[in-house]
Image (cartoon, rainbow, N blue to C red):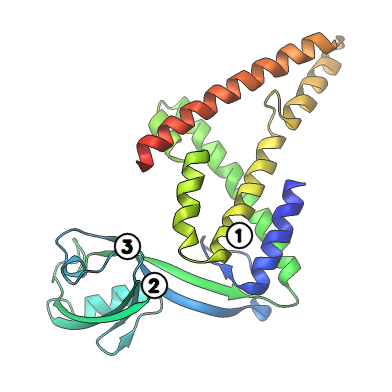
Amino acid sequence: MNWLAAIIIFTIIALIGMPQLIENQFQIKNDSRVSKQEVLAGFVEEGSPADSIGLTQGDRIVQINDHQILNSSDLRSTTKKFAGESVDVRFVQGGQEISKSVTLRNDETKGNFGVAPADNTLVRSTWSAPIVGVGTTVQFTAETFKGLFNAVANIFQGNASKAGEAVTGPVGIIVVLKDLSNQGLVFVLFLIGVISVSLAVMNTLPIPALDGGRLFVMAIFKLLKKPLTKDLEEKIHGTGMAALLILAALITVLDVKRFF
């Protein structure tokens, strides 16, 4: 059901405009039209030229001199071209367009402007929207399995902190939802779709108390040709549920430390 929910959500988003958040994100080329393309300030370095003109995280960078900024490459190439020179920067902050002059740094190692850009590109589909819904679900399912594999690998390699960075819980989801709500309903729907995919993947894993765990336990007992009594099954899945609750509590602690 979670995969079906993800397909429906991603299909609706494809009709409105699908956010392009990963490299080579699934789309049908001959039925894809860019409906929105802009660059946001993802991070602003303190004391940088960008910081000196009041640019803040989430502001939309519109233009530098007479160069329109439509993607991260535009921003990098333009700031490189005018490195060390005074430029006019147009950006949108709180719905208001602002224009200010600033001298860029002539230092590519630190960054000429001092901004880590974030592309905000939406691609709209028509007849291929259901196909994009399925394709996006499959693609993010693969990415989720890949992320889980990397997290487990980091744990076995002794990099527990690195593994923890790749996991978030209810607190983290609320924080992310709050941030995404500023970018519009499409991004909130997209996150809900990704969460649906994550839940579907978790349910396939052989973890007691989850659907995949129940099937796994039944398969093990059948292979061993041993009876699985109701009492034993409840003990196994009860222990699994307790472990999941402890894990959820640990993730919540990590989220609080990370976001607050």
Instruction: Identify the image quadrant of residue 17.
Output: bottom right
Q: Is residue 102 above or below residue 5?
A: below
Tag 2: amino acid: Val
Tag 1: amino acid: Leu
Q: Which residue is mark 2?
A: 39
| Residue 82, x across and y down, in percent | 19, 81
| Residue 87, x across and y down, in percent | 18, 83
| 143 or 249: nearer the viewer | 249
Q: Which residue is mark 1?
A: 189
* Sequence-first tag of 2 and 1: 2
Q: Is residue 167 visible?
A: no
Tag 3: amino acid: Gln
Query: SS at mark 1?
Result: helix
Query: SS at mark 3?
Result: loop
Q: Which residue is mark 3?
A: 57
Instruction: Identify the image quadrant of residue 107.
Output: bottom left
* Sequence-first tag of 3 and 1: 3
Label 3 – label 1 distance at C-alpha: 22 Å
Q: Residues within 10 Å of mark 3 (few under 14, many from 20)?
A: some
Q: Is residue 219 above or below residue 254?
A: above
Do the residues bearing badges 2 and 3 touch, measured as CB atoms within 8 Å?
Answer: no
Q: In the figure, is residue 65 to the left or right of 61?
A: left
Q: Residues within 10 Å of mark 1 (few under 14, many from 20)?
A: some
Q: Nearer the viewer, mark 2 or mark 1?
A: 1
Label 2 – label 3 distance at C-alpha: 11 Å
Q: Is residue 166 above or below residue 218?
A: below
Query: SS at mark 2?
Result: strand
| 186 or 127: nearer the viewer | 186
| Residue 162, x across and y down, in percent | 40, 35
